[in-house]
């Protein structure tokens, strides 16, 4: 699991096209997430049992007021989808901040100081990888009750491994470079060498990891919510929307198709953007 | 070689011990277990009775060493809900999870190896791009959603496959495909990268210069070298798949270990939960050891 810097070579057309598509998807998702209260055409929580399971716009007999139809409780599907985007992005970003803080700290310590500290760091990474993430996250939420804060902390505590692996191997490489030696010679403190010389030079690798981790956190949140131990109802998490609509999927498949496509497209977009950033920085981590 | 084995074994045991501690702490997180087991309508006397019956009145440290000592000898305690030994419960459910995991891994390898090899041989062609697109799609696909979609298409619309249960081999087709999806991206990318590296190496040039056939160069010389990391990662992937099958077992109502854990979480049956976490972790650690050993056996350079 080493990180090598390779000559990216001439940029291939479809890859940069993929990056732009990814950036476009992430841009739309960010707008939806930030301005959700202004964008929703209806109240995403308002139930109306008279208009349950209205069909979306591409089917016969749809109601133009509800473009994507309504769910089993008569709530506007488009509004819930937009609100769900806010929840997905919020959880994806906050989980990545928590896991990034843990993973980068651990990884840089191990890679920079080496020796016994590095042995301990490697052991922590090995242990973390042997723990089944979904099961432990389910158990924590199941025992302590569902709440957004708990969900974010649990996933953050479970998903730091990739940050640690990449921060460790990159800071190990940077540690031996000339400018770090120069900083030591100039009499810089340990903290200054770490914060001014090492961290800025591994930052691009960490940004790439961060994008991929946001995608992973969003997928995991949806999975936990689907299993009923993630975001508490009536909040419209996409995973929860699929779980709630599951009983109706054989008669009206669109109820699970719409939130699923949204989830798939968002995760695909973030991954495309992450791959594009990796190419742009000329970094490639072999994990 | 022996020293290498010995060191790996020590690390594996330490990891297992750490996971044991974490699993114990995990189940004590909710505070007073006796209260949650007894239920919302229990009186103080009921809670006291539960506490005595399950040994929860003893100091936490003595409970901990008791669980560690017994787990080390293979005794994982008794389930609160099923009133049987946890090890029996897990042993009963394990075949379903293992069948699912091995089916998933086989499908993943059957898809990834040819795709990765062909993509490497035709590097930078449309086929290569299509393969990389498939890997990206696999990475972004929520497994529970793919499962539901397959159920609608193959279970309901076409009526080819059963949608839930474990009665026959047909029951494992859809869950196997869904599980395979989670491993296909990594395995394909690794095969492709390994083959590209191998094809550019000196020994392939030598093989070409000797006038060997294209098939012989590809399969005998390049693939042998490219396959080493793939085989090793496949073992690790199986570990991840066994841990991740909890979602798929739930979607397809397969009563495996993941389903057992899911039921037990809902019922506060914490001896089962901590045991499943431990068993899955131990299996993962064992598989990573197998993977390291395979690397060492397949690649003499790593034995030094």
Image (tube, coloured by chain):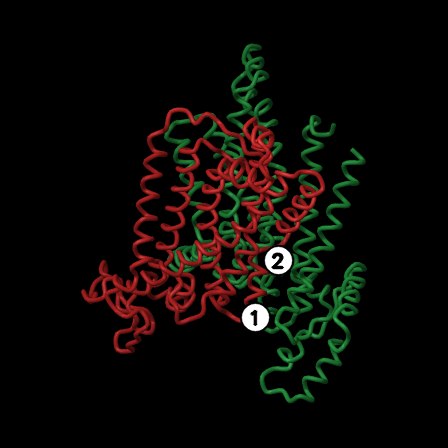
Query: For residue A186, which quarter of the picture?
Result: top right
Which chain identifier belongs to the green chain? B
Secondary structure at numbered mark 2: helix
Label drawn at residue A144:
1
Residue at image coords 80%, 64%: B70
Q: What residue appears at the point 25 percent right and 63 percent down from the top-left corner?
A: A38
- B226 sits left or right of A239 in the view: right
Residue at 65% x, 55% y is B280
Q: Which residue is mark 2?
A: B96
Question: Which of A16 and B159 lies nearest the eye of the viewer?
Answer: A16
Outermost residue toward the front?
Answer: A187
Q: Quadrant of the C terminus of chain A?
A: top right
Q: Please tell me the colour of chain A.
A: red
x%, y% of residue A94?
46, 56
Chain letter, disc 1 residue? A
The answer to whether residue A196 is above or below residue B88 is: above
Place residue B44 in its image quadrant. bottom right
Screen quadrant of the N terminus of chain A: top right
Q: Kindly indicate whether the residues beneath marks 1 and 2 are on one polypeptide chain.
A: no
The location of residue A207, given as percent across then percent down, is 45, 42
């Amino acid at each position: 699991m080493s990180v090598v810097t390779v000559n990216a070579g001439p940029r291939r057309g479809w890859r940069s096209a993929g990056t732009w598509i990814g950036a476009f998807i992430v841009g739309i998702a960010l707008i939806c997430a930030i301005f959700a209260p202004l964008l929703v055409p209806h109240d995403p929580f308002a139930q109306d049992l008279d208009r349950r399971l209205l069909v979306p716009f591409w089917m016969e007999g749809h109601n133009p007021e509800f473009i994507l139809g309504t769910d089993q409780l008569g709530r506007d599907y488009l509004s819930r989808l937009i609100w769900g985007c806010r929840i997905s992005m919020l959880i994806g970003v906050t989980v990545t901040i928590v896991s990034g803080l843990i993973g980068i700290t651990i990884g840089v310590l191990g890679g920079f100081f080496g020796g016994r500290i590095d042995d301990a760091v490697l052991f922590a990474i090995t242990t973390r990888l042997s723990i089944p993430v979904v099961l432990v996250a389910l158990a924590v939420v199941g025992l302590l009750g569902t709440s957004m804060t708990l969900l974010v902390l649990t996933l953050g505590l479970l998903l730091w491994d990739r940050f640690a692996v990449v921060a460790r191997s990159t800071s190990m490489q940077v540690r031996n470079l000339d400018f770090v030696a120069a900083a030591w010679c100039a009499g810089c403190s340990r903290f200054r060498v770490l914060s001014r010389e090492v961290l800025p030079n591994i930052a691009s690798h960490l940004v790439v990891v961060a994008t991929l981790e946001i995608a992973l956190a969003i997928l995991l949140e949806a999975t936990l919510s689907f299993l009923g131990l993630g975001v508490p109802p009536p909040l419209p998490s996409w995973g929860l929307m699929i779980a709630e609509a599951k009983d109706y999927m054989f008669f009206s498949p669109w109820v699970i198709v719409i939130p699923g496509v949204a989830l798939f497209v968002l995760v695909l977009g973030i991954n495309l953007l992450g791959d594009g950033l990796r190419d742009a920085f000329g970094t490639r981590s072999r994990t | 070689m022996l020293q290498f084995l010995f060191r790996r074994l020590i690390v594996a045991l330490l990891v297992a011990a750490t996971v044991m501690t974490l699993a114990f702490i995990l189940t004590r997180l909710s505070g007073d277990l006796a209260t949650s087991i007894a239920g919302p309508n229990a009186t103080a006397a009921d809670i006291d009775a539960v506490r005595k019956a399950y040994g929860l009145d003893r100091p936490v440290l003595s409970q901990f060493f008791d669980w560690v000592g017994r787990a080390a000898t293979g005794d994982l305690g008794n389930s609160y809900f099923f009133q049987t030994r946890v090890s029996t419960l897990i042993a009963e459910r394990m075949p379903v999870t293992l069948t699912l995991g091995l089916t998933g891994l086989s499908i993943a390898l059957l898809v990834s190896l040819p795709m990765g090899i062909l993509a490497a041989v035709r590097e930078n062609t449309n086929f290569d791009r299509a393969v990389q697109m498939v890997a990206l799609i696999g990475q972004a696909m929520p497994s529970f959603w793919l499962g539901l979609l397959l159920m609608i298409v193959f279970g309901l619309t076409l009526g080819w496959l059963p949608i839930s249960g474990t009665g026959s081999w047909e029951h494992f087709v859809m869950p196997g495909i869904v599980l395979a999806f989670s491993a296909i991206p990594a395995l394909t990318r690794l095969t492709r990268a390994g083959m590209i590296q191998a094809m550019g190496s000196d020994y392939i040039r030598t093989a070409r210069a000797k006038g060997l056939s294209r098939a012989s160069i590809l399969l005998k010389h390049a693939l042998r070298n490219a396959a080493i990391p793939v085989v090793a990662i496949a073992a690790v992937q199986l570990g991840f798949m066994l841990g991740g099958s909890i979602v798929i077992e739930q979607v397809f109502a397969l009563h495996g270990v993941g389903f057992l854990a899911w039921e037990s979480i809902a019922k506060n049956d914490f001896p089962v939960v901590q045991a499943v976490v431990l068993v899955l972790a131990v299996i993962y650690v064992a598989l990573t050891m197998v993977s390291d050993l395979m690397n060492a056996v397949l690649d003499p350079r790593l034995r030094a």
